[in-house]
Amino acid sequence: MTIQSRARPLSRRGTLLGTAALASGPLSMPFISKAGAADPIKIGLLLAKTGQIAPQTEYLAQGTYLALEQRNNMIGGRPAELIWLDEPSPQAATQNMQKLVQENKVCAILGGSLSSNALAEEATAAELKIPLVIDNAAATDITGKNCNRYTFRLNTPVIVQSRMLAPFAMTYGKKWYFITASFAFGQDILKSSRDLLKAAGGTEVGVDEVPLNTADYSSFILKIRQAKPDVVLGGLSAGDLSTFLKQWNELGMKGKIPFVEIAIGDTDIWAVGPEAASGVFTKLWLYNNPNNPPEEKAFADAYMKKHNRPAADKAWMGWITAKSLFESIEAAKSTETMPIIEALENWKFDRAGVHYNYRKWDHQMQLRNLVVQVKPKITDKWDYFDVKAALPENPAELDKVFGTPEEVGCKMG
């Protein structure tokens, strides 16, 4: 694939005043110049403002804005600003993505709260030739068969998280019942977990694929109770997961059959409440993990001071992706596409034994995942989890765990 770098004049005065665009061809200008030094670097933020994912995207946005505030709203000596547009559906999200690029003149975009949206957005990023850093969506195909040179992704793919969680699920037994959402995220979990169960010689005793925003899970829970599985493997997201776990408890199932799922968000479990919360999950980050490096502890402290509540994992996810992009723009000394992409491909976070980077050939961020279990007794309204493991146990095995090019299926050229 040939990458074309979209030149962006550093002065936006004509655009901001509604005047005609410059008639001349693309300009090549230094990152800092007398004419453009005062013009802000514009970065798009594409996250849902309403819907069942909104409690998560609020934290994603807050972490993103805090990352910029910690830089005094400056990148490479120039003021910088975020422009946040809504992400209500795949079609509307891509329309807003076009608006960010063509009208707001952003140099890069952060976002992608749901896998269904992110899959559409990454295709649009390639069409528009704009760097896109996906901060939340976990569908395997994003950095798998749908990968492209313009798209980077933080969240660990579903298949990788499923591999990490499967051994813990197997400790309860090999008779599994699946309850998953009937959209990209849930379908991905169902397929990958089924494959892992089959390879281990296990038995599928039931499966339900449920619509988004399901209000009543009682009929599904009764089917699970009758099937008597060793473990329930979930694939529900955000508010749907919270609703299910509340009703699971109301129908007397908490503690009767173990529940496991990948990619829990703090907002998901906080919404359940201490009486109903249960389960074993994977997650990327925990605000009070004693193994967090000093820079992340400082972020958690700054977030608490600003918002008077702990930083959810989604706040960190917004923060680390924004940090990677801001530092890459600064390292590139450019607001043009190719220099930013090349800088992201070389970006690294390496602090106190904690290491993150985007793998060059699929643009997937590699980082260890936590396996967490809900505490048997919750005494703090924010502190729900005990950390059971950080996987892989040997950080040197990250590349192996995330898969080979043949396994991943990314062919970006």
Image (cartoon, grey):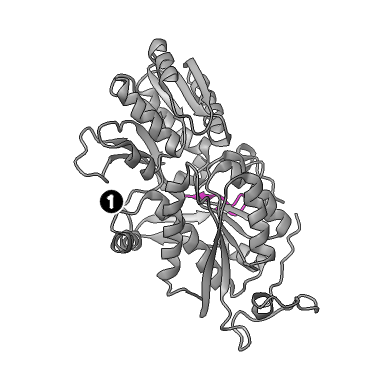
Q: Nearer the viewer, residue 326 or 112?
A: 112
The answer to whether residue 46 is seen in the rendering is yes
Q: Nearer the viewer, residue 321 or 275?
A: 275
Depicted 323 relative to depicted 19: above or below: above
**Count of marks placed on residues:** 1
Image quadrant for the N terminus? bottom right
**Residue shown at the point (24%, 44%) measured from the top left:** 381
Depicted 331 relative to depicted 203: above or below: below
User: What residue span does the magenta drawing correspond to?
Assistant: 359-366
**Residue shown at the point (45%, 68%) measured from the top left:** 68
Position of 273 with respect to 109 (left or right) is left
Q: Quadrant of residue 244?
A: top left
The answer to whether residue 76 is seen in the rendering is no
- Does 151 appear in magenta? no
- Does 361 appear in magenta? yes
Q: Quadrant of residue 100?
A: bottom right
Residue at the spot of label 1: 288
Callout 1 environment at 10 Å: few (<14), some (14 to 19), or many (20+)? few
Farthest residue toward the bottom? 34
**Residue shown at the point (57%, 66%) measured from the top left:** 43
* Residue 96 place in picture, x, y as percent: 63, 56
